[in-house]
Amino acid sequence: MCLVHLRATLDNWDPELVHTFAAEWEVILVDLAGVGGFTGTTPNTIEGTAYNAFAFLDAIKLDCYDLLGLSIGGFIAQEMALFHAWQVRRLVLAGTAPLYTAGAIRDTAFRDAPTAEGLLTLFFEKSASSQAKGVDFLKRLDMRTAERDTSSTLAVRDAQLIAISAWGVRDETRLQRLASIQQSVLVANGDNDEMVPTENTYLLAEHLPNAKLSIYPDAGHGFLFQYPVEFGTEVNAFLGS
């Protein structure tokens, strides 16, 4: 199951990345309560959102699964691996951080209406090569024109920002909880993530007992959208190993 970033819906996943996953695995993309076209209220805690995800998985009667979490989705994935360790087989943490250090929420993320320019700023490096890959990504996002998901509301944004802020409260003792995640974990990021700084990825790799670290060059928070086939292939190999 794939858990997406701040304010995102099903249509924020890169089709090329999802197709790469789907070549080898059954893929579940989900909006949780209040997000996109789903009814309900978005929880304003990471823990609450994790239990919301469990309710969805219970409803579809899935009791063993792999998790991929991007950004805030990675926070949720960590909680799920801790709370329901017997159900989570393997874990992929992309552009995310451990409890106590959520990173920097840049002003662009606060805007009432997300824009293409904002996605390029938040997710891609300033280099010409990375920005060009970002433009390609935006074109792929626009490929599906029928039955697109509903955009997230400002209430979703605000609830998720509260959850992120609480997750990032400084307390280094919280890093110790990562030792309880015994699953194999792929920890990945771009080499210069300014949204959730790459140093957090190294922290995860250092404190998770069974972590594999993967850093992509000339890339930022959206490294997996800059390298969709490469990252998708790496994830497929990791899950199958």
Image (cartoon, rainbow, N blue to C red):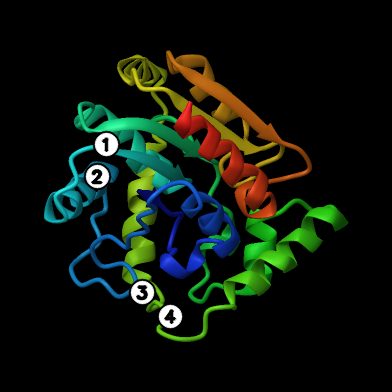
Q: Amino acid at mark 2?
A: Ala
Q: Residues within 10 Å of mark 1 (few under 14, many from 20)?
A: many
> Sequence-wise, which precedes: disc 4 or disc 3?
4
Judging from the image, what secondary structure is the residue with disc 2 in? helix
Dot in front, 1 or 4: 4
Dot in front, 3 or 2: 2
Q: How many marks?
A: 4
* Image point (27%, 36%), residue name: 80
> Sequence-wise, which precedes: disc 3 or disc 2?
2
Q: Name the residue carrying label 1.
A: 80
Q: Name the residue carrying label 3.
A: 153
Q: Name the residue carrying label 4.
A: 148
Label 1, label 4: how far apart the Cα atoms are? 28 Å
> Which numbered tag is attached to residue 50?
2
Residue 109 position within the rendered picture, expressed as x and y whole percent measured from the top left: 54, 61
Report the residue that reaches farthest toward the bottom: 146
Can the viewer see residue 221 in this picture?
Answer: no
> Which numbered tag is attached to residue 235?
none
